[in-house]
Each structure stands twice: as C-alpha cells, then as structure tokens.
Image (cartoon, rainbow, N blue to C red):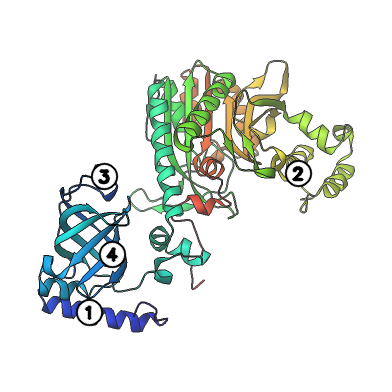
Amino acid sequence: MENMENSSEVRIQRLENMEKLKAMGYEPFGCAYPRTGRLADIGAAFEEHKSVRAAGRMLARRDMGKSTFAHISDGSAKFQIYVKKDDVGEEAYAAFKILDIGDQIGVEGELFVTRTGEKTIKVGQWNLLSKSLLPLPEKWHGLQDTEIRYRQRYLDLIANPDVREIFNKRVAMVREIRNFLAGRGFAEVETPMLQVMAGGATAKPFVTHYLALKTDMYLRIAPELYLKRLLVGGFDKVFEMNRNFRNEGLSRTHNPEFTMLEIYEAYGDVNSMKALIQDLVTHVAQQVFGNLVIGEGERRIDLTPPWRTVAYRDLVLERAGSDWYGLSLDAARKRAGELGCEFIDPAWNMAELTHEVYEKTIEKTLMNPTFVTRFPVELVPLAKACKDDPSVVDVFELEIGGCEVAPGYTELNDPLEQRRRFAEQAGGDEQKIDQDFLTALEHGMPPAGGMGIGIDRLMLILSGCDTIRDVILFPHLKPRNA
C-alpha cells in the first residue's frame, strides 16, 4: 500500500482505512494528549519498567503476527514501540494493524530494552491522534527532490534528519546571539516593518498601499534609521533581530526576505563593532557548532581570532593592478571585463565600476574572516569619514566564506553632513530625503558604532550548507503556475 505511485489511489485507500478506524471507535483527528515528555527526554531519563506516555508520527513498522514493532518520532527523537495483541486487547490490536505510516499516535506503556539492546515502549494502550491521508515521500527513507524539499519543507523535515538538525542549530544560534547581546547590556527593540520611506540602505523596496492612511508604504529594507532615533532618545545599546525585504534577485546567497541583526552602541565606533562581531561569531561557533574550523579543502574556514584587516583600496590594487586608479574610465572598463566582470553598465562611474570588480572578483576569494575597511564615501552615505582621508569612510565589511556577513560603521552623527549626503544621493529630489530622521539627528545623536549581521548568511557559513535556501525554512520560490 505504501509503495503505490499514484497518490490519489493511496489517498483513497487511506480514507477507507480512516472509515474503518472510525467504525471501530477511533476518532481520526483526536484531542490533546498529555505526555511524560518528548521522546528525547524519555530516552535521556530511561529506566526499565518505568511507565510513560508518548506521542509521535509512525515512521516504520514490522508486523510479526500477534505483535508489532514500530518507530515513532515527535521531532526530538525516534523511539521504538512494541504492540502486542495480548497487552492491548484483540480489538485495539486489529485497529493498530490498520494504521498507516505517517499516522500520529499516542501510546501509554512501560519501558524495556529488547534483546538487541534497543530502548522500547511496551504499549498497554494507544490512541489515534491524527490520520495521515497522504504518504510520506519514498517511504520516509529520504527526500532528494530539491523542488519538493523547498516547497514542502514539512516533508523534508520528516524525511531528512540532517535537515531537521540544521534548523535546530539555527534556532540554537539565534537564541545564543540574543543571550550573548543581553549579557553585554544590549536591549532588544522592535521598529516598524511598514515605513513611509524605504531608508537605511540602497535597495529596491516592495511597495504596498495603506488603506486607512490612504498612502503608499514600503516594506523596510533596513531598520537603521529608526534604531538611530532610539540612540537620540537615550537608548545607548540596542539591537533588533528583524525581517528585511528587498525586491531584488534570488541567488545562492540572496533571498528577498531575510533576517538581519542590527546593533547600535552609543559612544562606540567601528573598532568596538569589530571586537563585538569577532567575539559574537566565535562564541556562537563554539557553543552551537562546537568548532572554529568549518569545512575542508578550498572551502575550509578558520574562525580563530585575531581576524585579518585590510583596506578596500589595497585589495583592488592587488587584483586590478597597481595602476588601476590612474586608468581612464574606458581603459578601466576594458580591464574589468578581462578580470571577469560579465556585465558592465556604460553609465557606471569609476567608483561604481571599482565596486563591481570588488564584488565579482575579490569578495569571493576572502574565505577566512576578513575586515575590509576604508570604503569610498559614495558607497556608504550613513558612515563617518576617516579623519585622515575624507574620501573614504570609517567602516568595515566582514567577509567570511567569500561573501559579506556584516557591515560595521563609525556612524555619521553630523546632521548637516548627513543632509548633504542624502541630497547628493537623491539627486536633488527633496521627496527622497528622510526629513524626520534628519530632524532627529539635529536633536543630537551621540557618537556611535553600528553593525548589521546577515543571520541567514551566517548560518549558511557556520553550517557548511551550499545555498541559503538550505537554511531558510520556507525560501521564496516561483509559483508553480507562473
């Protein structure tokens, strides 16, 4: 029955089994079932002859005439159960044999160890908690179809224990980050996801319409400008674990909806952010993943401090040639193509072209943690300029595993300079300037350090997965009918 390829035939058969069970007095979608604990807890506190109540999905069974061995799973662990006709009664055993793989059941019984040494529940009574009308993939032994894995993640979690473990680690990582920051005196706050202006980063926003206010709104691309308002208001150490939305492409390291951690510390700067991110990442790697070395061969990453610091300009000169900044724009375009930049927009100026060379040919080579510093001021309008060179800003981009994980700044708190940069970025269009934020700055924002950490990317790197879709429970996919 479980090997039927036609799911509609399987569903019909399972509906028939459901009716048989109903006729025998078993409600197919039962009620709450108090448990002794999760299966992992029962296994950890195992004592022979101890009475327990457990529940889970039946993943496998082996019928032996008047008795049956089966395995159930509740997400925490898989556990063997033993159902014997003499123990549960003739009618209950006949009903148990009608159950299908995938059904959710509750069992009550006594713990024992089989002759093969497996911890087992000897069932005295069982209940049907939820009838599964569709079969598990490939008899639950493994789900390999990538399309199904992402679209029906619940099947992926049932069929692939390694996938469940990845997401257990993600849960642990987020919890550890929150605990780490709370331990250092940071307050977790919440800022609007719907914003009148999409600010705090350069990205194409998702647009919606607010009926009650009769105005267009934007899903936030970053919480930065609101968190800085809190610095003005007297919060000296804040963070937000937030959802950001950028109406841009999908790739191995990009999802349009993503989780970002943003941190701001009054009276800090880019150096305090460097120290914080190094401590945070190494702490999480050790506590959650148990190691500071990830992967092997070309993908090997060593997180052991101290981390390398190198200037943006030095990396560009090393890759593009010592004469790069002296080239004409035409000559620079030609060399960028030779270096491997497949698309070069004729409208790009030298700064934009240089950054394309950096992103397409340099960034991917930075495997071990690297703080890339002193970016051109045009690229980072919210950061403070370096004292020794106003053409570059006092920032870093933390690169790990060939991709950006965290930008950190000495934040710009000069409202006049901020207004000038916003105006330059907006091309003179006053409607594109966040006047409310500038008003807040004019009330006096303390000097501060700030940082954003891509949680999905950090998980991608620490877990050793191949694509960001593997660390997001429900990644964005093109609709089936599109």
Determine the residue positioned at 83% across, 49% down. 337
Residue 63 lies, in percent from the top left, at 27, 72
Give residue 85's position: percent from left, percent from top: 15, 70
| Disc nearer the start of the sequence (4/2) | 4
1 and 2 marks in contact (CB < 8 Å): no
- What's under tag 1, amino acid-wise? Asn
First in residue order: circle 2 vs circle 3: 3
Report how far apart the C-alphas of labels 1 and 2 lie in the structure. 60 Å
Q: Quadrant of residue 352?
A: top right
Q: Dot 3 corresponds to which residue?
A: 41
- The Cα–Cα distance between marks 4 and 3, rounded to whole angstroms, is 19 Å
Dot 4 alpha-carbon crowd within 10 angstroms: few under 14, some 14 to 19, many 20 or more: some
Would you say residue 255 is visible in this rendering? no
Earlier-in-chain disc, 4 versus 3: 3
- Label 1: element kind: helix
Residue 60 sits above or below residue 32 on the image: below
Q: Nearer the viewer, mark 4 or mark 1?
A: 4
Q: Which one is closest to the eye, mark 2 or mark 3?
A: 3
Which-is-in-front pick, marks 4 and 2?
A: 4
**454 w.r.t. 106: above or below:** above
Q: Secondary structure at mark 2?
A: helix
Identify which amino acid the numbered label 3 is placed on.
Asp
Mark 1 touches mark 3? (CB < 8 Å): no
Pick whichever, 207 or 86, lies toward us.
86
Position of residue 250 in the picture relative to residue 230 (left or right): right
Mark 4 → mark 2, Cα distance in angstroms: 54 Å
Q: Which residue is mark 2?
A: 361
Question: Going from the N terminus, do you reach mark 4 or mark 1 first?
Answer: 1
Residue 173 appears in which quarter of the rendering? Answer: top left
In this figure, which residue is indicated by the disc labeled 1? 17
Viewer-side residue, 78 vs 308: 78
